[in-house]
Amino acid sequence: MNKITGFSVLTTGEGERVTLSYSVLDADGNIVSTNNRKNYVVLDEDVLTAIAAIRTDAAAHLEG
């Protein structure tokens, strides 16, 4: 099983890129490997809308 341990969203020339790190666990919950990484460019409009909402919320916290 893969367990996400962190993620971020970056604006790049290709679009919105999600980077994530994760650990791999076996069926008993033991850690098999850590600090694995993956990234991808978001194409789904619903996900892009969610990213925009998170950015708007984060910006509002800066103004307060």
Image (tube, rainbow, N blue to C red):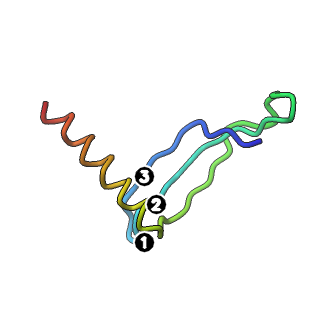
- Residue 7 appears at what percent x and percent y? 51, 44
Q: Secondary structure at mark 2?
A: strand
Query: Whole-Å distance between the Cαs marked 3 and 2?
Result: 6 Å
Label 1 belongs to which residue? 14
Q: Quadrant of residue 33?
A: top right
Label 3 neighbour load within 10 Å: few <14, some 14-19, many 20+: some
Closest to the observer: 23 or 55? 55
Q: Within 10 angstroms of label 1, few (less than 14), some, or many (20 or more) residues?
A: few
Tell whether 41 sits left or right of 55.
Answer: right
Contact? badges 2 and 1 (CB < 8 Å): yes
- In the rendered structure, the answer to whether residue 21 lies left or right of residue 15 reads right
Q: Is residue 35 above or below residue 37?
A: above
The amino acid sitting under disc 2 is: Arg
Name the residue: 72% across, 43% down. 2
Give the residue displayed 52% in from the left and 52% down from the top: 19
Q: Which residue is mark 2?
A: 17
Disc number placed over residue 43 in the picture, else none? none
Q: Sequence order check: which comes first, mark 3 or mark 2?
A: 3
**Percent coordinates x, y for residue 42 in the rendering:** 48, 65
Quadrant where the C terminus is found in the figure = top left
Relative horizontal placement of residue 21, taking residue 41 as reference (left or right): right
Q: Which residue is mark 3?
A: 9
Q: Decide: marks 3, 2 in contact (CB < 8 A)?
A: yes
Occupied quadrant, residue 46: bottom left
Which quadrant would the N terminus be assigned to in this image? top right
Q: Mark 1: which amino acid?
A: Glu
- CA–CA distance between discs 1 and 3? 13 Å
Q: Secondary structure at mark 1?
A: loop
**On screen, 11 above or below 33?**
below
